[in-house]
Every structure is written in C-alpha cells, then in structure tokens.
Amino acid sequence: MKLTNILLLSSALIGSLSASSLDTQFNYFGNLTASSINEKGYEVNHVINSNVDDKFSLAPYSKVGAQFSIYNDDFMFVTQALAYQNNDKNELELTWLNGRYQIMDGLSIRLGRMQLALFLNSNTIDVDYVHLWTKAPIEIYGSMPLKSFDGIEIAYEKVIQNYFIEFKITPYGKASTNVNVLKGTVKADFTDMKAIALSVQKGNLTLSASYTIGIFDMPTDNITGLAQILGGLEQYGNDVSRYSYKNKDISFLSFGINYNYNNLLFTSEISQIKSESLVPDMTAYYLMMSYRYNKFTPFIMFAENKNDKNLYKTDNIKVVDATSGQLKAGLDAILYNMNSSQQTSSIGLRYDYKVGIAFKAQLDRITFDDYGTYYPNPQSTHQRYGFLSQEVGVAKVPVFQFTTGLSFAF
C-alpha cells in the first residue's frame, strides 16, 4: 500500500469523522540516551539506527516522537512520527498512519500504516518510557528490522469471565526500510505478509502469541565477493539459492509472558525464525526480572539468540579442483562473518523522577559464538556482521556496553 493511498484513505476517514462530534489527543515522547562500549575494535550494530562503538554517543538510542489521534465512538485516525539521527543523518520515520473502523461491538478493521504485532512490546517499542530497559534486547527485537507495515488488520476483542482476549488477523501487508548492514545501508523489503496474533490478559498476567509469514528481499551487492563466488559455484553445478536474500520465504513464531506480583515483575519472550535464505534459522529469547522499591526499579535480564549451525556448513558444495576449493573457502569466510549468535547479560536501574520522566542506566555483557569453518588464526577474526561485530586482528573478549539517559512521555 503506497503512502499516497494511505493519505487518501486517511482523508476519507477524517471526512467521515467530521460528520459527528470528535475528540482529539496529542502525545509526545522521547529518549535522550548515551551509549558506549569498553573495547576498541568492536561495534554493536543497531540494525536500523547508528552503531555503538567505544566513544560515548547520543545517536544510536536517542529520539523524539509524537502521536496525534482523532476519534469518536466508531472511527479513529492516528498518526505517529519518529525523528532520530542515523550515521550523521537526520531521519524522520512515519511509524503509524492509519484509520480504524468499529464494525460492531468487539470487532474492528484498521487500514494504513501500523507496527508489526510480532512481539509482546511491538506496539510500544518506540516509546522507551514505557519500558524498564534503556534498549530492547536486540537478540529478539533485532531479528526483524522492519517495525511498521502498510496493510490491513482485523481485530476482535472479547471479555470472557475475567479474561480479556484480543485476536488479530493481518490478511495483507508489506513494508520496507533502510537497514545498516556490512558497513553500509541497504533497502530491505517484506512483502505478501500475513499474520495472526493472540493476547490473553487476566489481572496481572498477560500471555501473547503470534505467527507471521512473508517474503523477504534485500540485495547482497554490498557483501564483497558474494555474487562472484556464487556465480562461480553455480558453474560447478552447485545449488546456491540458499545464500541469497532475494525473494525468500520467511516466518516468525513468537510467545511472550508478562506477570506482575506485588512489586515483582517477570517478563519473557521466545521467537523462532525460519527462512530458506541467507537469513539463518534462529531461536531467540530473553528473561527479565525486576523489583520496584518506591521510585527505584532495579532489574536483571538475560538474552540469547542461536543461529542454526546448518547454515554455516558447506559440506554440500562440490570441490573438484583448486578453483572450486577457493570459491568454497570464500563462501565459508562470508558465512563465518554473517553469524549473529550472541548472549547478553544485563543489570539495570530505572528511577521514576515523576510521572512522565524516568532516568535509566543499563550495563550489558555481550559475547558471541563462532560458527562455520573459517578461522584466520586464534587471535584474529574478520569483521563479524552480526549484532556484535569484531574487526580484524582484535582478540575475542567479552564486551561491556553501558547505556544511560532520560526517557519521557506526555
């Protein structure tokens, strides 16, 4: 759905809204957060925004956003914009621009731009004030760089005894965004998207589940040498279709839980990705526990993502001479660099200064796993293009990331 079509739809909905009494609501939110890591020769990839290195920077996690709504009993129009800096460039992203119509009690349809209901916090992921962490666990929330999509969503809500149940179906959707990858920016597309999501809430317990499928497309031109290597291997009769992002099926299955008991909070999510492409099959999860004491809320968190090791095995590649052997070694090197399996242990603290303003600090210890067969030598790896990347000639050590700042929402 093109932006022009969304604007036309929005205009029509606003016209419908104007026929009856209207209410409006305006909110703004933001994050002023600095972050750095303790080791030279490393970067933490932010997927969409700027990367984090060993110098304190406000760019990766700082942002400001605004949301405006017009609504009555049957219709709602909402728009949300997000401004941030990405690699020294100012970016403005339209994350919400849609209209919702209440068909009947409990049943509604929404058209336009909205955020993917992949995870427990997808709808509020940009409003950092809502969350305890200074940054979402990238192991799971970074697995899908596309946050918003243009499409249709049908939602049904029902209260059964003490249970509030919400069921969503997305029969159509597509999305695109610029993604930081391989020291550059490329456009990623997610088309022919279909999804279902279920949320059940009773008292202080919330359970969620979702399943999303679609076609993922991203050029691999900026992966040095990949096109030439794959072309050469094909001439030797090898099937190399797996080593591409071009128009590949991809699916996401996720579950989440959020439980409050007095001042104790437990949150956990797990996600599984399946893809017949250079995107590895992956299982990711995190667990977080916190305890609120007056205005202070300390928390601990552990997150991990594990790529399927089969992606990094190239036993199926035929080697019949020296040239094919060199091509296979080149593919091994690229796959080794593409690995993104890592673990993050975190401790953090949130201080609620007053309603709408919170100070946060978080310390992460990040390590990664080596997959594949390409090891230059024990103390030197090529650049890893996962979430934590390492430059050539830098010893592999645990990396500590410190993030602190102010979040607000009014």
Image: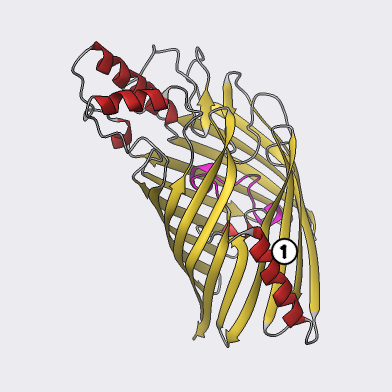
Type of residue at label 1?
A: Thr
State the predominant SS element of the stretch in magenta.
loop
User: Which residue is at a point 35% across and 28% down the rendered structure image?
Assistant: 371
Residue 152, magenta (yes or no): no
Q: Tell me the quadrant of the picture where the C terminus can be found.
A: bottom right
Find residue 103 and report its image quarter: bottom right
Is 319 placed left or right of 284 in the picture? left
| Rendering coords of residue 241 (x, y %) | 32, 38
Q: Is residue 358 visible?
A: no
| Rendering coords of residue 128 (x, y %) | 68, 52
User: Which residue is at a point 54% across and 69% down the rendered structure image?
Assistant: 152
Question: Which residue position is annotated with label 1?
Answer: 79
Find residue 308 and report its image quarter: top left
| Rendering coords of residue 72 (x, y %) | 73, 82
Label 1: which secondary element: strand
Taking depth in this image into account, of 127 and 207 the one nearest to the observer is 127
Identity of the residue furthest to the left in this view: 320
Residue 131, magenta (yes or no): yes
User: Which residue is at a point 64% across and 39% down the rendered structure image?
Assistant: 49
Marks counted in the figure total 1
Taking depth in this image into account, of 293 and 281 the one nearest to the observer is 281
Is 408 placed left or right of 226 in the picture? right
Q: Tell me the quadrant of the picture where the N terminus can be found.
A: bottom right
Q: Residues within 10 Å of mark 1 (few under 14, many from 20)?
A: many
Above or below, comparing residue 381 to residue 129 in the picture: above
Find residue 6 and report its image quarter: bottom right
**Which stretch did the figure color magenta?**
128-146
